[in-house]
Amino acid sequence: MRPLQYDAIYEFIDAGVDLFYQGKHRTLNDVRLANLPKKNVFLFRARNFNTPSELIPALLDARLSSSEEEKFGDFLESLAIYISAMTCDGRKSSAKGIALEFDDDGVRYLVAIKSGYNWGNSSQYQSLEINFRNAIQIQRQANSRLNLRAVLGMCYGSRADVDKGLYIAKMGQSFWTFVSGDAALYLQILDRIGVRAAYQNRSFSAERAQVEGALVEQMRLDYCTPDGLIDWHKVLAFNSGNGENG
């Protein structure tokens, strides 16, 4: 493996975090009380929210977090490919279900990248195995003498490597060491994400406070009793009513 260029990695991480926060800003600006019909009002009632200042932050949290894990998982996958390109000329694979291919010490690795250990159910694992078999077959048709190894890489998790026969599962520190050669890189990735997130979160928090305040005031006007408590019957009628008297 070639040595890592840490400054370039940090720039890549910064750009990824910036893009992540751009998405958060867009989502925040799209939040409207008119989106209430898409939410599980029964769940929010079970959490004993009684005032707009209690409910609105929870609604915002639910809206903002709904797609964050998937988006950030995509970023971590792209980061792993970027690091592998730096160390071993790794490249994004064209094979279905395979994220990364690279050669190291006479071995060609075919790597599927997932966020964490609980990434999929049994049928998704079956699909993964089919994808590995198909990718291996295609590679062998092109060069029957290739030494091929399939790897399932998971960006976080603490379990030891597991040899599944068809593929090896690596997670957390083991996976990041595998693509980088640096056993401490996973810590540096986390630290850099934190530094950039702290920078981006200043403007985001200010914008969120403004949006939150406006939504709280709107809810007080439209969905509250005169004493400032949420009129849950009115909220549910808007969320789930079909026009019948009841």
Image: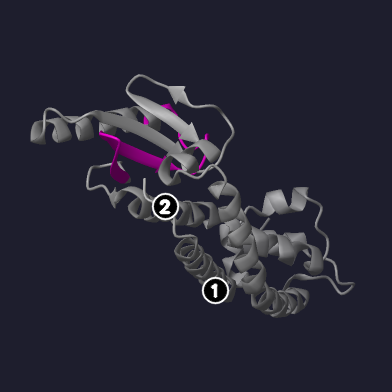
**231 lies above or below 204:** above
Which amino acid, mark 2?
A: Pro
Image: magenta residue range: 100-123
State the residue at coordinates (51%, 64%): 10
Q: In the picture shown, does residue 169 fall above or below 173?
A: above
Q: Position of residue 50 (x, y in %)?
A: 83, 60
| Marks 1 and 2, how far apart at CA | 43 Å
Q: Position of residue 164 (x, y in %)?
A: 39, 21
Question: Mark 1 = which residue?
Answer: 30
Which of these two is toward me, 237 or 88?
88
Task: Specify whether residue 53 is in view.
Answer: yes
Q: What residue appears at the point 67 percent right and 54 percent down from the top-left corner?
A: 41
What crowding class fits label 1: few (fewer than 14 Cα within 10 Å), some (14-19), or many (20 or more)?
Answer: few
Query: In the picture, which quadrant includes the C terminus?
Result: bottom right
Q: Where is residue 229 in the image (x, y as percent from the top left)?
A: 85, 67
Q: Is residue 4 magenta?
A: no
Tag on residue 3? 2
Local SS, label 2: loop
Q: Is residue 120 magenta?
A: yes
Depth check, front residue: 160 or 120: 160
